[in-house]
Image (cartoon, rainbow, N blue to C red):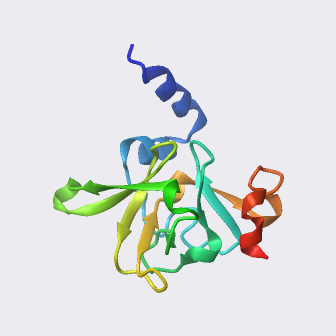
């Protein structure tokens, strides 16, 4: 047994099969058939694996791609970027910094103020509405919505 096998078994019981495939195996969910592509409620999106805060609804926009898209992470150090050359393409993969979960990809075709598009799989996220931020331990982000 490897050091990661118990962790992988635990994740397989906590996550749906799609959440596991996306976050742990870098899969991509279908566009326009996922939980958050057309979601407009105010709040934050956290890593489904660790609960690490990743993106805020105030930075979400409709990219027309069928996946949730954001202009920036909630805090820069919350995501890491790495080169992805899979499928004969050259892209920038986005992962959660703490949990190392695959989130999606980063493209330089977003709106201002950043010009970036963080194209993220809904299966990698859990949404926390503004009225639940304090109760769930995310009170530090309430000021963003004042």
- Residue 98 percent location from the top left of the image: 52, 44
- Which residue shows up at 37% across the image and 67% down it? 106
- Which residue shows up at 52% across the image and 52% down it? 124
Tell whether 33 sits left or right of 84: right
Task: Tell me the quarter of the image containing the N terminus.
Answer: top left
Is 72 above or below relative to 104? below
In the rendered image, the residue lying farthest to the top is 1
- Which residue shows up at 62% across the image and 60% down it? 45
- Residue 94 percent location from the top left of the image: 40, 57
In the rendered image, the residue lying farthest to the left is 88
Task: Tell me the quarter of the image containing the C terminus.
Answer: bottom right
In the rendered image, the residue lying farthest to the front is 77
Residue sitting nearer the eye, 83 or 12: 83
Is 31 above or below relative to 24? below
Residue sitting nearer the eye, 71 or 66: 71
Tell whether 128 sits left or right of 125: right
Is 41 above or below relative to 55? below
- Which residue shows up at 47% across the image and 68% down it? 67
Tell whether 58 sits left or right of 138: left
Residue sitting nearer the eye, 96 or 121: 96
- Residue 137 percent location from the top left of the image: 77, 50
- Residue 23 percent location from the top left of the image: 45, 46
The number of discs equals 0
Tell whether 127 sits left or right of 94: right
């Amino acid at each position: 047994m490897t050091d990661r096998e118990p962790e992988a078994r635990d994740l397989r019981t906590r996550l749906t099969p799609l959440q596991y495939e996306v976050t742990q195996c870098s899969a991509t969910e279908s566009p326009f058939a996922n939980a958050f592509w057309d979601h407009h409620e105010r709040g934050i999106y956290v890593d489904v694996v660790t609960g690490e805060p990743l993106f805020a609804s105030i930075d979400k926009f409709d990219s027309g791609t069928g996946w949730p898209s954001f202009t920036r992470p909630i805090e820069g150090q919350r995501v890491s970027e790495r080169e992805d050359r899979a499928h004969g393409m050259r892209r920038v993969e986005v992962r959660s910094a703490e949990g190392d979960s695959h989130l999606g990809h980063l493209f330089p075709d977003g709106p201002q103020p950043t010009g970036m598009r963080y194209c993220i799989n809904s299966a990698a996220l859990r949404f926390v509405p503004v009225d639940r931020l304090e109760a769930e331990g995310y009170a530090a982000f309430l000021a963003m919505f004042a």
